[in-house]
Amino acid sequence: MKKILVVLMAIVFTMGIIFTGTSCKTETGQTSETAGETAAATDAGETASGETETGSSEEPIEIVVWDWQAGSAFDPALEEINALYTQMNPNVTINRTGYNLSEYGELIKTAIQSNTLPDLFGLYQGTQTREVEKRGILFEWDDAINADPEWKANLGRTYGMGGTLSAEGKTISIPYDIFYIATFGYRNILENMGSSEEEVKNLKSYKELGDLCQRFKDEGHSTFYLTAGLAGGYLLRETFYAWVYSVAKDFDYVYEAEMGKRSWTEEPFILAAEAVKETNRMMREDVEALDAQTDNYALLLNQECWGSWYEGPWSTGILLDNQTAIENVFAFYKPPIAEGALENVWHADAAQVLSMRADNPNKDAVIGYMKFLATTDATSIFIKYLIHPAGKFPDNWKEIAKYDIYAEMVDMYNNSNIGPWICYTPDVEQALLVNLALIYREEITPEEGMKRVDEATKAYWASQ
């Protein structure tokens, strides 16, 4: 924390000047300092011109940030983090706006077209990132990261994660947090329905999970279902990719199909599509079309279901609004979809990632802020709100998190088989989203659906 101490020294020094009524500027604008003051400024990381890594020590800088992590976990966490950063860097203001993912795509498109992108902007990994990347406007962070060993060490294995990289393997985004998909359950709700956490965790197959939900439904329990807003078809597609990986045991298997190098009609894809169909038995029909990021949180928060099929560390932060919920919630892996499939499979990656234009005039200030987000000063605050940060964990992170569910999911993440989850080709993704939704609703068979995806993929690459 040497940097914090020296910045505070610089602030104290500045306040001393104010109260003694002296000036540190000459008529030419150059700094007039004693030898001792020069040494203090040097320790504070200033250049000979009096500039810090965030720019001039007096010039006000506003860093405008857009992201799609609006909610009762990220909003207060980032308010606190940004306030701390401003306190440490008085000339910098962080102006952050959080949006819902459902409205974010059009916002980014409009901002690109009108050249009004902010200093930092979130991109949803996959097709959105690739489409923006193709414009050649994104800053590549690798040189800056490699020039600062402390920053690189703070990022740890987050540096180089797939969801942060361009098609050429360059870092074009840096994340706030780590993304992984847990399945949540409530001990108290399960007990009310004659079941238990142990029964759920001992299920041997994905079909048995569907059978359990049907048993609850047949017995007349209104909380029989696992909630998940499937209006965002990406929820099905992301889990589908991880299921394919669990059977193929090859991370690149789905991406080879996406690139037209193998057929979507091969067995791992059919088995994963059958699991998509099986998922229908775990849901309540009238909540399937709800927004995954907002409406379904309310169902989970209010314990109107026995758990959630698609959640992650961000949801534990939201559950803090209901102490009965947080005290009873547990996380579990979805059971395997086929005999011999990998167990303990999660699709995980960098979560909310932030990008910057290569020509951003506030580049140095933005880099200084991104370095801060990876420090324990910032990650301690993320953890307090039960968000899994992308930066360095403090030694006392379990004490900060307080709740067992947080440590439980961190341990699960560290011991998971990590599968793929994103699609980079818009035409292929659209074919997947459409046909997986039809398979889910049992309007077509898994075989027919995957045949259609295969045909759409071949047609796309033939046109290129």
Image (cartoon, rainbow, N blue to C red):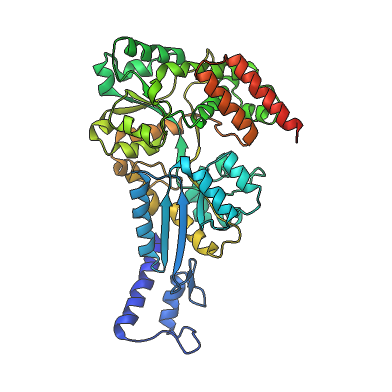
Residue 123 in view (yes/no): no
Residue 267 location, quadrant? top right
Question: Which percent across, then down, holds residue 133?
Answer: 63, 48
**In this view, 422 is above or below 282:** below
Image point 36% across, 36% down: which residue? 315
Q: Residue at x 43, y 84 (%)?
A: 33
Q: Is residue 195 above or below residue 33?
A: above
217 sits left or right of 391 in the view: left
Tell me what residue is drawn at x 52 percent, y 23 percent.
437
Please give left or right for residue 18 compared with residue 374 in the image. Answer: left
In the displayed structure, would residue 178 be above or below residue 296? below
Q: Is residue 197 left or right of residue 172?
A: left
Q: Position of residue 222 (x, y in %)?
A: 29, 18
Image height of 128 relative to 421, above or below: below
How many labels were placed on the picture? 0
The percent position of residue 178, horizontal first and vertical second, equals: 46, 40
Q: Is residue 400 left or right of residue 27?
A: left
